[in-house]
Image (cartoon, grey):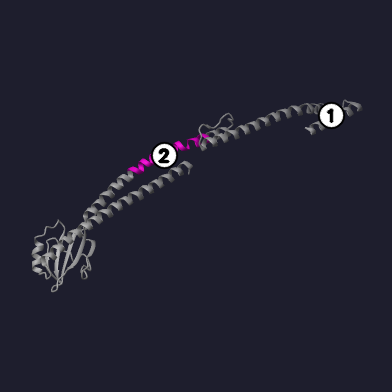
Amino acid sequence: MKYSTKLFLSVFLLLAAAITVCCNILILSSFCSTHENEIADAEKSYRLTYYALSALGGANPQPDKLAIGLQDLAMDEGDSVLLLSGDEVIYASESSKGARSEAPDADPDKDELKLYCYSDDKGEHYIQIAARIPSEIYDLKLIGRYRIENAYSMLNAQQKIYVIVNSASFLVCAAVLWVLKIWLTRPLDRLSNAANAISSGDYSVRADDSGNDEFARLAESFNSMTDKLVGEMEKQREFTAAFAHEIKTPMTSVIGYADLLRSGGLNEEEQIRAANTIFAEGKRMEGL
């Protein structure tokens, strides 16, 4: 895998992870805040009903009187109240079906307010609040059930938006990173092209070392190395040419006198002179 592709994938995955984490944190934070507000509103509504019944009943509340008082209370759609005396239902609003059974252990201890969040079979979310109404004669319990759908509706809507926004963000990030990848690695591509040209025998090519970044310094070092290599190669060619010229003269003499010796047309003195010449030229070549 090319370095530029590795760079692209690494940065893209980091950005994708960062965007995903940030979006999830924002969604979760928004959900928790809305959920807490709905629970606080439900508890406030319950306490108003509870205090109204307590004030209506006085020190010794009568269940029938409390039931009449509950009938006059206005309830939001989906909310309900249930008034119990022991296990006997004294009053139940029209939408209170399941208010007791959906939340286990809904019976509060004395002077204790209990809250339960749950969802029914239809997937609707509720908070159930229960408390005892002080009475010396009756075991009175007031149970309120309130819908808390706003937080979950907002969560579902935000999750859908999250999918769309994340997809668009990933596409935009991928396009931007791809352009940046090409721009950032272009000096490396130029350097690679220069190296390939030099390896093919074109020693006049040099890398573009314009700029002040790390790639420019790398190209400058590459050009300096290339200049030194070309200089050494030129010296080697000059040496080879000079050596060939220097060795050509003694070789000509050696070959000429050796040919005369082979012909057998020399007297003894000429043979000795030819042998001495061959020996002298051989020593000269040895010195080279």
For residue 262, the mark is 1
**Secondary element at tag 1:** helix
Query: Is residue 258 shown left or right of residue 221?
Result: right
Q: Main secondary structure of the magenta part?
A: helix
Label 1 packing within 10 angstroms: few (<14), some (14-19), many (20+): few
Residue 169 part of the magenta-drawn span: yes
Give the camera-side residue of 185 and 213: 213
Q: Please tell me which residue is depicted at 28% across the width and 46% down the height of the picture.
A: 161
Would you identify the image quadrant in which residue 204 lies? top right
Query: Is residue 214 shown left or right of residue 225?
Result: left
Residue 6 part of the magenta-drawn span: no
Image coords of residue 54 (percent x, y): 14, 66
Q: Is residue 260 above or below residue 94?
A: above
Query: Is residue 180 shown left or right of residue 257?
Result: left
- Magenta stretch in the rendered image: 168-191
What amino acid is labelled 2 in the image?
Trp
Q: In front of the other: label 1 or label 2?
A: 2
Image coords of residue 237 (percent x, y): 68, 30
Quadrant, the C terminus: top right
Q: Please tell me which residue is depicted at 42% across the width and 44% down the height of the picture.
A: 11
Question: How far apart in space, not on screen, are marks 1 and 2 (Cα)?
Answer: 79 Å
Q: Is residue 64 visible?
A: yes
Label 2 packing within 10 angstroms: few (<14), some (14-19), many (20+): some
Give the camera-side residue of 277 and 44: 44
Give the labeled residue for mark 2: 178
